[in-house]
Image (cartoon, helix red, strand yellow):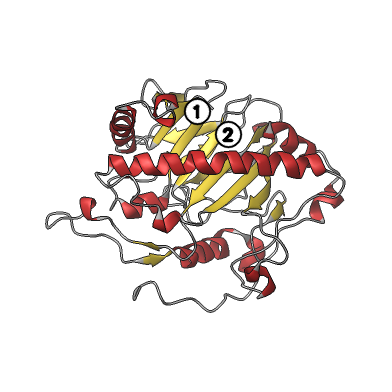
Amino acid sequence: MPRAADAAGRIPLLDIGPYLAGEPGARATLARAIERTCRDTGFLVSANHDTFAAAAAFFDLPTERKLALKVGDLNIGYLPYGAQIVRTSKVHANTQPNLSESFYIVNDLSPDDPRIVSGDPLYGLNKWPGGMPEFKAATLAYTRAMRPLAAKMVSVVATSLGLSDDYFVAGFNEPTTTLRLIRYPSHAGAEANQFGFAPHIDTNFLTLLARSALPGLEVRTTEGEWIRPPHVPNTFVVNTGEMLGRYSNDRYIATPHRVINDNNTLRHAIPFFFGPGLDAIIRPVATCVSADNPAKYEPLLYADHRRKLNLTNFDHRRTAASPVPRTDAATA
């Protein structure tokens, strides 16, 4: 497969420090920069921010200990090699499973949470490896740190769309978050048409990816060229997801990306996915709709979107019976 080119200025490095510090004019400046890049590649790199060690420690466990935490009806816990084929991709016919293993950590609930007690099928408890308290502490601390940062980024995205700074607050009152720890073996062992992570778009609102020690992420431009973001230590790669595309009526289209680990050694990644609450209704915003550019999407209940995605892409979900769909999206 063709190798990716250098980003060559297409994926900008943006310093979000002044915005986070509340400096006058910083929000507007950052919003303009986000607007430019979201109309182009949909990726940027933000500076001014160690879960990698915790991820490595987990993946080094014996296989039987990891499989004891294997994902079930909800994507929580360990996803072994060969368990995900990205069938929903609109940019590549993915026929091989991703050459990677993963561990999913979602919003951390307690056993006495009313949604757990009632058996709500949309919520579940995280699965933690026994004898590794430092793993739970490190990953939850990272999640707690990432949530307010992601919320700040959502707010400035609203500004870039000509909306009030707090426009998305209601829909993100209880955001859907997933910290996905991933380990990629060397691409040298890949089969034909196999990737560390096959070409896809993220299906949430925003993804924040702390830069790993080794490159591997590749982004497809609107011209169809694959490029690699600037590899700058201590930064985050931020990219738009499918839900932002729907909110913006495709003004900001989620950009396809893939992972090829050609480093001849193991590579770790810790993407943090940030989306609206499961009860949020996703519909194009007023500033992105006009007589000449009518809404391209019907209202969508985010919970329905998540359920359909999981049933399509994950083999352990495809073998189970589909739950009764919720139908309140169109009438909300």
Quadrant housing residue 189: top right
Task: Provide residue 291's location: percent of width, then percent of height.
Answer: 12, 58
The amino acid pointed to by label 2 is: Ile
Of the numbered discs 1 and 2, the one sitting upstream in the chain is 1
Task: Provide residue 142's location: percent of width, then percent of height.
Answer: 63, 39
Instruction: Tell me if residue 326 can be seen.
Output: yes
| Residue 75 in the image: above or below residue 256 | below
Task: Provide residue 251's location: percent of width, then percent of height.
Answer: 27, 46
Circle 1 is placed at which residue position? 3
Front label number (1 vs 2): 2
Circle 2 is placed at which residue position? 260
Tell me the residue at 47%/56% (across/down). Answer: 173
Tell me the residue at 40%/57% (across/down). Answer: 170
Q: How many marks?
A: 2
The answer to whether 156 appears left or right of 161 in the picture is right
Q: Quarter of the image containing the C terminus?
A: bottom left
